[in-house]
Amino acid sequence: MLINSIDNTILALGSAFFSAVSNILARTILKDIKTKNILGLNFLMMTGVLALFSPWFFKINISFKYAGTFSVTILLVLLISIIDLISNYFYFRSFEESEASVVTPILSLSPGFIFVFSWFFLDDIVNYVQILFACLIIVVIIFISTDLKNIKSIKKLNIYPSLMASLLFALSAIPTKYLLSNEFINAPTLYEIRGAVIGLFAIMFFGSGIEEMKSYHFRYLFIRSLFVIIQWLLLYAALIKGSAGISYTLANTTPIFVIILGVFFLKEKLSLRKIIATVLVLILAMMINLMN
């Protein structure tokens, strides 16, 4: 496969790019509709898209070598799906209740949690210099994503959904890394099953929300689903090849790509602060890559 020949740093940064587009679309959709009204349909739509191609990629390893782990694989896939259902609920709630300038810095804390979880559960050993570079990237992302003029008002906002989403996304990364690295399941299959479980559970608990949606909501959700599928498949591919913490750190450079997209498509002006931050993050990402 072509994706196997791509460096994991490029894969993670590619995930960040598609995440930037999906975040912009999420904020657009949630301006006039509630999280619970789109959560289930959002994931079922992505599952439907993947189902069209599943005859070519669907695979759970049930060979003799992995026969004893089949039940563990199914249980872990269900665990990932449930954790991601809750984390995505809080993710969408974050954009529903707060501006992106408040949500993004808190979501950017997720790689920090992953370093702790992966060390504790996976014995994931990462070069200390790489961790330092990754921590610097997290700090820079939080710095450029935070509106310093409104720093006092942030204390008054509800940051709980963003914090919970960040923590749960980190927790979900651990069994995901374990399954993919050990080849118990491949990335598209994991994402398809995960999407189906999240979608069905979300509709059971929150309803379909179809009656609240207008035609453009469906259009935006479908377009967003394509970007999200690519985003997560690239992230999963990066997880297979590299450290969980490093992969998620690079995949969380989303604000950098939001800045770049804003310049090219929204004609936004670049401040010196954003230019320096963008260059610094890209340099740090290159340094991490050179140390692989």
Image (tube, grey):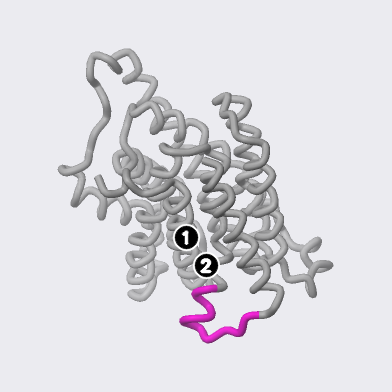
Q: Which label number is shown at residue 19?
A: 1
User: Which residue was labeled with disc 2?
Assistant: 257
Q: Quadrant of residue 150?
A: bottom right
Q: Which amino acid, mark 2?
A: Phe
The x, y position of residue 54, in whole percent, is 20, 44
**Residue 213 located left or right of residue 51:** right
The residue located at (36%, 75%) in the rendering is 216
Q: Earlier in the sequence, mark 1 or mark 2?
A: 1
Q: Quadrant of residue 167?
A: top right
Q: Is residue 259 above or below residue 239?
A: below
Tell me how far mark 1 sits from mark 2, CA to CA.
9 Å
Q: Which amino acid, mark 1?
A: Ser
Q: Residue pushed farthest right?
A: 152
**Residue 146 located left or right of residue 197:** right
Q: Is residue 228 above or below residue 67?
A: below
The residue located at (54%, 70%) in the rendering is 258
Q: Which of the two residues, 263 or 71, is positioned nearer the viewer here?
A: 263
Q: Where are the magenta residues, as a range?
A: 260-270
Q: Are marks 1 and 2 in contact (CB under 8 Å)?
A: yes
Q: Is residue 235 above or below residue 268?
A: above
Any part of residue 133 in sight:
yes
Element under disc 1? helix
Q: Is residue 144 above or below residue 74?
A: below
**Residue 22 located left or right of residue 162:** left
Image label count: 2
